[in-house]
Image: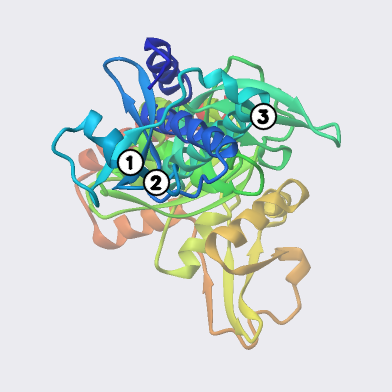
């Protein structure tokens, strides 16, 4: 047998520790490369059953070939004489098959070509093992968020950076299109990324990760908000323009739990953690509603809406919205961002008009539904007056509570914007 010694096991264990490749894969690659080197130097090497064996206790690798015991040998690579066989096993008989150790005493005699073949096979096997490992890890992590450390930044041919992130058992590559615009990524910094896709075009598969994907925001809120994690609060939809603004529509399955307040947290603590991770990206928490009028009105916040008309056009669902003149720019947003995100969030095409723009023109013609939206503060007041709730003392106490709640909402808003 060919004695390698404990160094083989040490190398295998080191490879398993550093690159997560099982040591059995490495040892098998060594054995196969030695077998290939042997076959290259043997004229009649197509012997069925020729194989290698590794003795873990001694660190020896042997090459074994099955040979048939015969009276007269005609092929020394397939057969062994009865006389020679009896020296090995006294009670052997002709016709039996013995598995014999044919490992050369000095394996180095196979020379440079044999060693090169062994190296090529070993390299190929290790690459295949690493490839399979990446695929297995990716299969279990795709569509989830992972935390890693920026390992290096590679400059691509177009001059843009590719950020390589150490995610433990594999590396994630974040190309420029998946990076936050204007963000300066630094080696050694910890980062949360979304495991997006696997590119299997090179020698080793490349795991593409994202810092701009909408699902990344969803995963972060699931981590920060226990009510989302346990299903009490549900994220219905997300619209994001990475690095600038995100709108999230949430709904509570428990009437006693405010979904917006749960996501914001005490004094904005929960949402602030997400905003910090996303480098101060603005996040609007929207109350989802099954009624499209309410949903569209909420989605266009912080703008105040006065009238909404819904149309069922052949090209898709469309909504026309009227806002006060002083709310038009707020409803549209900078470069149309607010209305664009609202349309994506609600899946309705939204056209916005100011009251002066629509004055004297027909509005809502052909609409399936047109609703004038009463300001929330007026609606609450009218409801109370209609119901005649409470005494003057109770009304005074309710006013105090409303003032406190208003102050808390302002604090939360200031905290998020900061």
Q: Sequence order check: which comes first, mark 3 or mark 1? A: 1
Q: Sequence order check: which comes first, mark 2 or mark 1? A: 2
Q: Sequence order check: which comes first, mark 2 or mark 3? A: 2
Between circles 3 and 1, the one closer to the viewer is 1
Q: CA gap, disc 3 to disc 1?
A: 32 Å
Residue designated by label 3: 113
Residue designated by label 2: 73
Q: Taking the image as drawn, is residue 333 in sight?
A: yes
Q: Are marks 2 and 3 in contact (CB under 8 Å)?
A: no
Element type where label 2 sits in the image:
loop
Q: Residue 208 — which label?
A: none
Q: Residues within 10 Å of mark 2 (few under 14, many from 20)?
A: some
Q: CA gap, disc 2 to disc 3?
A: 30 Å
Q: Quadrant of residue 165?
A: top right
Q: Residue at x 58, y 75 (%)?
A: 309
Element type where label 3 sits in the image:
helix
Q: Residue 81 — which label?
A: 1
Residue 221 located left or right of residue 339: left
Furthest-left residue in this view: 91
């Amino acid at each position: 047998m060919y004695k390698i010694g404990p160094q083989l096991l040490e190398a295998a264990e080191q490879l398993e520790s550093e690159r997560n490749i099982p040591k059995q894969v490495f040892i098998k690659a060594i054995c196969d490369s030695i077998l290939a080197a042997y076959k290259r130097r043997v004229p009649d090497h197509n012997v069925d059953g020729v194989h290698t064996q590794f003795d873990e206790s001694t660190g020896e690798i042997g090459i074994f070939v099955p040979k048939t015991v015969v009276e007269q040998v005609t092929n020394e690579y397939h057969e062994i004489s009865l006389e020679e066989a009896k020296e090995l096993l006294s009670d052997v008989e002709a016709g039996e098959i013995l598995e014999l150790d044919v490992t050369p005493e000095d394996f180095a005699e196979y020379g440079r070509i044999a060693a090169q073949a062994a190296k090529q096979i070993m390299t190929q096997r290790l690459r295949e093992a690493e490839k399979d490992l990446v695929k297995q890890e990716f299969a279990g992590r795709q569509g989830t968020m992972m935390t890693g450390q920026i390992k290096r930044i590679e400059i691509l041919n177009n001059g843009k950076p590719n950020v390589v992130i150490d995610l433990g058992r594999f590396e994630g590559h974040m190309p420029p299109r998946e990076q936050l615009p204007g963000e300066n990524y630094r080696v050694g910094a910890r980062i949360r990324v979304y495991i997006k896709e696997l590119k299997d075009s090179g020698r080793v598969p490349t795991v593409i990760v994202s810092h701009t994907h909408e699902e990344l925001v969803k995963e972060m809120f699931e981590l920060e908000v226990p009510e989302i994690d346990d299903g009490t609060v549900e994220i219905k939809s997300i619209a994001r323009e990475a690095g600038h603004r995100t709108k999230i529509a949430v709904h509570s399955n428990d009437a006693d739990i405010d979904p917006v307040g749960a996501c914001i947290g005490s004094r904005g603590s929960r949402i602030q953690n997400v905003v910090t991770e996303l480098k101060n990206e603005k996040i609007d928490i929207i109350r989802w509603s099954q009624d499209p009028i309410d949903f569209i009105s909420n989605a266009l916040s912080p703008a105040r809406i006065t009238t909404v008309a819904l149309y069922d056009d052949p090209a898709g669902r469309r909504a026309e919205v009227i806002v006060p003149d002083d709310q038009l720019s707020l409803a549209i947003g900078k470069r149309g961002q607010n209305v664009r995100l609202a349309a994506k969030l609600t899946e309705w095409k939204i056209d916005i008009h100011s009251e002066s723009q629509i004055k004297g023109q027909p509005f809502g013609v052909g609409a399936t539904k047109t609703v004038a939206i009463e300001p929330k503060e007026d609606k609450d007041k009218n409801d109370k007056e209609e119901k005649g709730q409470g005494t003057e003392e109770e009304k005074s106490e309710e006013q105090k509570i409303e003032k406190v709640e208003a102050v808390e909402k302002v604090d939360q808003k200031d905290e998020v914007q900061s």
